Image: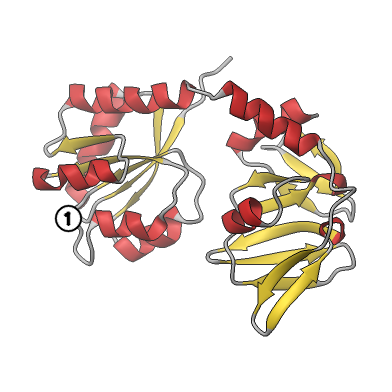
Amino acid sequence: MAKELIRAIAVDDENHCLKTLEFELSRSCPDVELVRKIQDSEEAFEVLKTEEFDLLFLDIHLQATSGIELLERLMPVDFEVIFVTAYDEYAIKAFDLSAMHYLLKPVNRNKLRMAVDKVVEKRKKIDVQQYDQMLRALRDDLSQSKKIGIPVQDGVEFIDPSDILYIKADSNYSTFHFKDGRKLMVSKTLKTIEESYLKSGFIRIHKSHLVNISELSKYFKNDGGYVILSNGERLSVSRNKRQILNDLF
């Protein structure tokens, strides 16, 4: 079975630094696939909040902002971070943000490998008890669910969770898609909705999609993985969510 690559993005406003990192990764870290190299911080922000990846190599000293400020705007994050910079006085702040590692320029080949190894080890650690609890919660349907109150612009919308097909994320907003075709956009992140309003009966199949389990019609493992909902709509399943679906069904 082929080893799954770590998908990485590098953000640095100096192109030669990006090329150097790419070179060192290619000869020292074959388990890392550098999928994007970005120089502009605003472009980086837009990509990082939507792209599916595992590891971010981030320069602290960017032209328009600092890498730390960029990361703080993205918090909370679901990827690992390795800071790459010439300014070691930022090290303590970097670790406060839970950066996996801190590399000084020019990047040392051996230290780069050590930093990536830390990422690999962290990815292997699975809290079995928490994972089992999550699966048990996902198996519990919302048959006895009461309506939930979702804050909207002019008040509160009371929703029966069983009427929801799925919720789609759009930056700091989320759009509810109902079985009757109605849509409702609210100024809540998908993470907030998942943790505060819909704690069971729904499954996160992608960074952008939270789906009502009872509305799943079929799960296809081929073509990257996707599900078909009760209304025939097709939604992609992200790489890191496929195991949950495999174990759930």
* Res. 11 in view: yes
Position in image of residue 106 (x %, y %)? 11, 37
What is the quadrant of residue 162 in the picture?
bottom right
Position in image of residue 145 (x %, y %)? 84, 53
Q: Which residue is mark 1?
A: 61
Query: Does residue 81 appear to the left or right of 141 in the view shown?
Result: left
Which amino acid does the dot numbered 1 rest on? His
Q: Is 61 situated above or below 181? A: above
What is the quadrant of residue 134 in the picture?
top right
| Along the line of sight, the residue nearer the viewer: 56 or 202 | 202
| Along the line of sight, the residue nearer the viewer: 56 or 129 | 129
Q: Residue at x 81, y 58 (%)?
A: 161
| Along the line of sight, the residue nearer the viewer: 50 or 17 | 50
Q: Residue at x 41, y 26 (%)?
A: 122
Outermost residue, top side:
1
What is the quadrant of residue 71 in the picture?
bottom left
**Crowding at mark 1 (Cα within 10 Å: few <14, some 14-19, many 20+):** some
The quarter of the rendered structure image containing the C terminus is top right
Q: Residue at x 26, y 54 (%)?
A: 68
Query: Does residue 113 appear to the left or right of 187 in the view shown?
Result: left
Q: Secondary structure at mark 1?
A: loop
Query: Does residue 162 appear to the left or right of 246 in the view shown?
Result: right
Model colouring = secondary structure
Q: Is 173 situated above or below 235? A: below
Q: Residue at x 71, y 31 (%)?
A: 135
The quarter of the rendered structure image containing the N terminus is top right
